[in-house]
């Protein structure tokens, strides 16, 4: 008997999961999360999973309960005799802890990978990891999607006359360079020096932006301090306009107020993390059709390599 796809959602990604299920063409599965007085919780599936392909959608941004909930759901599905358990993690939290950047610290991304595998996950589907090498932390297949599939068509329809792609730091040069190459545009780089995490001491611009329409590309916007400062610097250098584009809108601390007060014409984000509130400058593009298509291809044992190309438009 052929296995059946069943799609479930954790608490953190309910809205995106509903869109993914709708794009796939079936309703979300039924689950219940029971909360206890001491703060513990226990997820349970309210339908049979035996012999089915189970896809659990949950981003793992803070609080850590989101990660714990995903681990418990994976364990419950495995114990319920699911044929395979696939964790769909639109935003993979702790991904910035991908190496020892100073003595006596953990490699958090590797620890999270170990926890997911210990829980019994058979496969991971995620989007725009902060560091590509995190795929190698897993001993199970990782389907690493790129938000370019939804961002590139959006940039094209803007019809910006003097498009220039920009990286807000040297670490994102490869990402911004890939967009620039595909869109046949120039590339500029913001070079920043930090005093400490989330605090930039000095920033300089490498490249010419005079009379250009600039799009800053990043994978994560956290407090929005660095990227709004980069945007202001670009405008000071004579740019016509500046936009920001990121996959994961973490938006912590003063992020919303900084964006509202910024020089950006708009900030383009994917819906891997739910927005806490509306912001007039933020345009949210859905990744649901991309994830739904990948789920279908994984279930049917079909190639997903086309999704690694910027020309992919769903």
Image: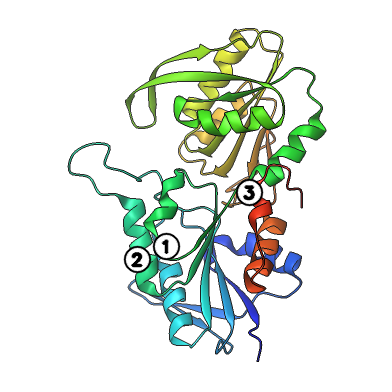
Measure how far apart labels 3 and 2 are at the Cα level. 27 Å
- Which residue has dot 3 on it? 308
Q: Whole-percent x and y of residue 54? A: 57, 77
Q: Is label 2 in a helix, a strand or a loop?
A: helix
Q: Position of residue 104 (x, y in %)?
A: 17, 43
Disc 2: CA contacts within 10 A as few (<14), some (14-19) or many (>=20): some
Pointer 3 or 1: first along the chain: 1
Q: For marks 1 and 2, give the CA distance.
A: 10 Å
Report which residue position mark 2 lands on. 115
Q: Residues within 10 Å of mark 3 (few under 14, many from 20)?
A: some
Quadrant housing residue 236: top right
Q: CA distance from mark 3 to mark 1?
A: 27 Å
Q: Nearer the N terminus, badge 1 or badge 2?
A: 1
Q: Residue at x 75, y 17 (%)?
A: 162
Earlier-in-chain disc, 3 versus 2: 2
Q: Position of residue 163 (x, y in %)?
A: 72, 21
Residue at position x 40%, y 54% in the image: 136
Point out the image quarter for the N terminus: bottom right
66 shown above or below 99: below
Residue at the left extreme of this rendering: 104
Q: Nearer the viewer, mark 3 or mark 2?
A: 3
Q: Looking at the picture, does residue 6 appear above or below residue 182?
A: below
- Nearest the eye: 132 or 104: 132
Q: Position of residue 229 (x, y in %)?
A: 51, 20
Q: Are marks 1 and 2 in contact (CB under 8 Å)?
A: yes
Helix, strand or loop at mark 1: helix
**Residue placed under numbered mark 1 in the picture:** 67
- Count residues near mark 1 (Cα–Cα under 10 Å), then give few for <14, some for 14-19, many for 20+: many
Q: Is residue 314 left or right of residue 132?
A: right
């Amino acid at each position: 008997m052929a296995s059946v796809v069943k799609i479930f959602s954790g608490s953190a990604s309910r809205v995106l999961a509903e869109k993914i299920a709708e794009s796939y063409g079936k309703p979300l599965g039924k689950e219940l999360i029971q909360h206890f007085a001491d703060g513990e919780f226990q997820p349970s599936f309210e339908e049979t999973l035996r012999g089915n392909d189970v896809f659990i959608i949950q981003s793992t941004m803070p609080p850590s309960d989101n990660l714990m909930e995903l681990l418990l759901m994976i364990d419950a599905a495995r114990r319920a005799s699911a044929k395979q358990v696939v964790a769909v993690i639109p935003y993979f939290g702790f991904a910035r802890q991908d190496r020892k950047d100073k003595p006596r610290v953990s490699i958090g991304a590797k620890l999270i990978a170990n926890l997911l595998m210990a829980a019994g996950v058979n496969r991971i589907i995620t989007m725009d990891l902060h560091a590509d090498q995190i795929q190698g932390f897993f001993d199970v297949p990782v389907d690493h999607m790129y938000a370019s599939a939804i961002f590139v068509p959006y940039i094209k329809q803007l019809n910006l006359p003097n498009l220039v792609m920009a990286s807000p730091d040297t670490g994102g040069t490869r990402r911004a360079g890939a967009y620039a190459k595909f869109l046949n545009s120039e590339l500029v780089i913001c070079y920043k020096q930090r005093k400490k995490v989330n605090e930039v001491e000095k920033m300089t611009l490498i490249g010419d932006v005079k009379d250009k329409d600039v799009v800053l590309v990043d994978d994560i916007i956290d407090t929005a301090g660095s990227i709004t400062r980069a945007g202001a610097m670009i405008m000071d250098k004579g740019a016509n306009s500046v936009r920001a584009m990121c996959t994961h809108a973490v938006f912590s601390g003063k992020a919303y107020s900084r964006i509202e007060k910024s020089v950006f014409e708009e900030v383009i984000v994917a819906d891997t993390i739910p927005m806490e509130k509306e912001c007039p400058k933020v345009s949210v593009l859905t990744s649901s059709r991309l994830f739904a298509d990948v789920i279908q291809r994984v279930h049917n044992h079909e190639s997903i390599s086309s999704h690694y190309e910027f020309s992919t438009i769903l």
